[in-house]
Amino acid sequence: MKKCFLLAVALGAAFLVQQTKAETVLFEQDFERVSAGSMPKEFLALAGDFAVVVEDGAHFLRLPGSPLDTFGALFGPSHAESSLVEARFQGTKQGRKFPTFGLSLRGAGGYRLQVSPGKGQLEIYKGDEPLAGVAFAWESGSWTRLRLAVKKGTAGWVAEGWAWKDGTTASPEPQIRWEVVGEPSAGRAAIWGSPFSGTPISFDDLRWTAP
């Protein structure tokens, strides 16, 4: 019995070591231990009055509904290898006005995965330049999860994106893909929001990992 127990412990430890080697967490923030107020110090706001809010016991980051512009905040270290970033977002429409929101890798001018409800699309941008778009049905008021990977494959670098309603299951395959020309520059991850509907955009559960 004792030998079986020791074997189970050894196998468990080996699994944990393998799991640790398989994934490195570059940044993680769910805001649950952050008090309401200004943005945490590990973020660098490029523009916008981001602040942590607490509603019904839940903590998250919020961008106010005005002014009507595009705002972003960088987080994590500068990174030049393959990685994957994920977060969830919430916004609302107002009449025929819609917000846009997204997250990016490789700095402020890097590759951005963006939900554009006014277009009914999930898009990949390079900086402010749209590169590709696919149909995506966004639901006003619901939390939406986004996942962006910028990784090196056998044929070169590629940016891949997923989007799905919080509480449902993500597609096993990326919904959108863009083949990167050349070697992408190093940079930090970022979140983005454009409150064009005049209502706030919320951000939560940021997680950035490298294989």
Image (cartoon, grey):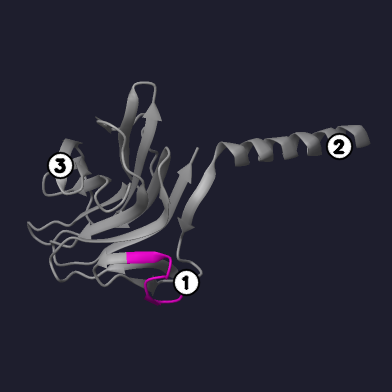
Residue 154 position within the rendered picture, expressed as x and y whole percent measured from the top left: 39, 21
Q: Is residue 113 left or right of residue 81?
A: left
Nearest the viewer among 14 and 166 is: 14
Residue 5 position within the rendered picture, expressed as x and y whole percent measured from the top left: 86, 37
Of mark 2 and mark 1, the one earlier in the sequence is 2
Of mark 3 and mark 2, the one earlier in the sequence is 2
Q: CA distance from mark 2 to mark 1?
A: 40 Å
The amino acid type of the residue labelled 2 equals: Leu
Local crowd at mark 2 within 10 Å, few (<14), some, or many (≥20)? few
Taking the magenta stretch, the answer to whether it contains residue 50 is: no
Residue 134's mark? none
The part of the chain drawn in magenta is 35-44
Q: Which residue is mark 2?
A: 6
Q: Is residue 1 visible?
A: no
Q: Is residue 119 left or right of residue 106?
A: left
Q: Which residue is mark 1?
A: 34
